[in-house]
Image: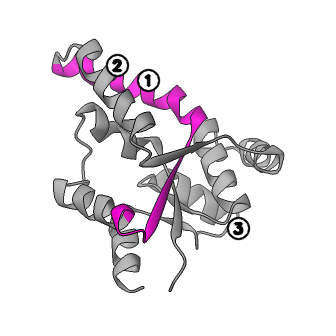
Amino acid sequence: MSSMTRVLLDSTYLLPSFGIEVEGLTERHIAQLREAVLSRKVKLYCLLVAWVEVIGKVCREAKRAGIIVDEVVEAALKSLFESKFYTWISPNLEAIRLAFKLRMLGHRDNVDNLLYATSVVHDMILLTMDQELKIFLANHGYSLSNVMDHVQLIEKIHNI
């Protein structure tokens, strides 16, 4: 039996829980990811610090779409925390040190720095659609072998 693929989610992948559509992430993709979790091919992890981004994005999108945040937030939080679908973690010291290095090299998104660093330290796949992060990492000689988007992950799971 193959081991479960451990996947750390970029905050973008939490937005559909709040009813926010993400360009390039379809209902079919979400269903495929859900099936991968339910069939124990994938285990999803989230960094607690991602809330810094999620809260801002949800409020901004809700305002733009005229959605009343209170109505959506309670159901989304219940799903994200009580469903046991996600394992919530914090970065450790080694990840924080690497995040500092990335920041000093010029990558200004501290949450992305912590996500990448945590994925490297814990040997996880970082699921992200952030092309800017990928370009930055490549330009500075960091491995992208553990960085992929949902389409790449779904393809990888089907080949396991």
What is the C-alpha distance between the residues marked 2 and 1?
6 Å
Question: The magenta stretch spans which residues?
Answer: 37-65
What is the C-alpha distance between the residues marked 2 and 3?
35 Å
- Give, as a three-letter code, the residue at label 2: Cys
Quadrant housing residue 57: top left
Query: Toward the viewer: 77 or 54?
Result: 77
- Give, as a three-letter code, the residue at label 3: Gly
Quadrant housing residue 42: bottom left
Tell me which numbered mark, 2 or 3, is placed earlier along the sequence: 2
Residue at figure coordinates x 58%, y 69% from the top left: 144
Instruction: Give yes or no for residue 77 being in the magenta stretch.
Output: no
Spot occupied by residue 53 in the image (x, y as percentages of width and height): 49, 30
Residue position marked by numbered label 1 in the rendering: 55
Q: Is residue 153 left or right of residue 134?
A: left
Spot occupied by residue 3 in the image (x, y as percentages of width and height): 55, 77
Disc 2, SS: helix
Which disc number belongs to residue 59? 2
Disc 3 residue crowd, few under 14, some 14–19, many 20+, Cα 10 Å = few
Residue position marked by numbered label 3 in the rendering: 141
Disc 1 residue crowd, few under 14, some 14–19, many 20+, Cα 10 Å = few
